[in-house]
Image (cartoon, rainbow, N blue to C red):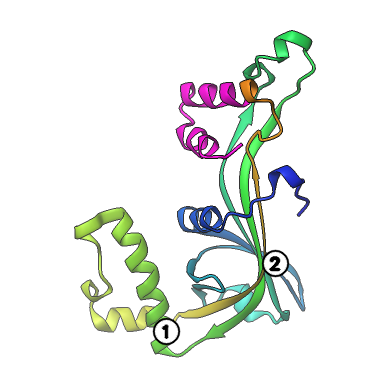
Amino acid sequence: MFVETEFREDRLEEITRIINEYPLASLIAQTQTGLIAEHIPLLLIDEKTLRGHISLENTLFKNSIVNNQVLYIFKAEDVYISPNYYPTKFEDHKKVPTWNYQVVHINGEIKFFQDQKTKLAVLGQLTKQHESITNGENAWKMSDAPKDYLMEMLNHLVAFEIKIEKIIAKSKLSQNREEKDFRNVITKLQESGKVNMAKTMGQLKR
């Protein structure tokens, strides 16, 4: 991914936020039968590890991945930016439309696990994180499901772990605009209901 210097995202806390808040990632891998892409929710375990699970019938598992190397892409919120958001546009009219967005690319080695212990652990970790966010004290627990039903479901799944080897992150958030244009973009986004992007931009140190 090409990343201009002013848009390079090096803040570990921001990269972590993007992964945690937008966990449905696009996975791309080169297999013996060709290039494949999947969309899989992932859990960041630590700075070097991602975990997830897929169906045993998924082509990602059924086809041999070249060198076990995969690319994961996490994309946060994105918004269209109109030239009319820039006060300086009305001075020289030398402004064009653009797009603001955040994205994280992760390269790493994937390893699959078919034992029940690992699959239960991965499912438990994913469930605990997302249920606590979604339902709080009323979170669904794996123990809520009948044990035989849960075991049957596990038989159709395979867990996997990705050892992170490289991270490239990009936050294109109008950093290249002069201050009054930058501030007015935030205002316009707030007015149009794009409050998450406005908040993210407002947290930038310029």
Residue 134 in the image, given as x and y percentages of width and height? 31, 54
Q: Which residues are magenta?
A: 182-206
- Confirm or deny contact between disc 1 and disc 2 (CB under 8 A): no
Residue at point 55%, 36% (across, down): 201
Which quarter of the rendered picture does the N terminus lie within? Answer: bottom right
Q: Is residue 68 above or below residue 100?
A: below
Q: Is residue 168 above or below residue 45?
A: above
Q: Earlier in the sequence, mark 1 or mark 2?
A: 2
Q: Please tell me which residue lies in front, 127 or 37.
A: 127
Residue 60 in the image, given as x and y percentages of width and height? 63, 74
Residue 111 in the image, given as x and y percentages of width and height? 59, 83
Q: Is residue 205 left or right of residue 128?
A: right
Query: Mark 2: which secondary structure?
Result: strand
Q: Is residue 42 above or below residue 6?
A: below
Query: Mark 1: which secondary structure?
Result: loop
Residue at point 40%, 88% (across, down): 116
- Name the amino acid type tagged 2: Ile
The answer to whether one can see residue 205 in this image is: yes
The answer to whether one can see residue 56 in this image is: no
Which quarter of the rendered picture does the C terminus lie within? Answer: top right
Residue placed under numbered mark 1 in the picture: 155
Q: CA distance from mark 1 to mark 2?
A: 24 Å
Residue 187 in the image, given as x and y percentages of width and height? 51, 22
Q: Residues within 10 Å of mark 1 (few under 14, many from 20)?
A: some
Magenta span contains residue 198: yes
- Magenta span: chief secondary structure: helix
Magenta span contains residue 87: no
Residue placed under numbered mark 2 in the picture: 36
Residue situated furthest front in the rendering: 206
Q: Please tell me which residue lies in front, 33 or 130.
A: 130
- Name the amino acid type tagged 1: Asn
Q: Is residue 42 left or right of residue 137?
A: right
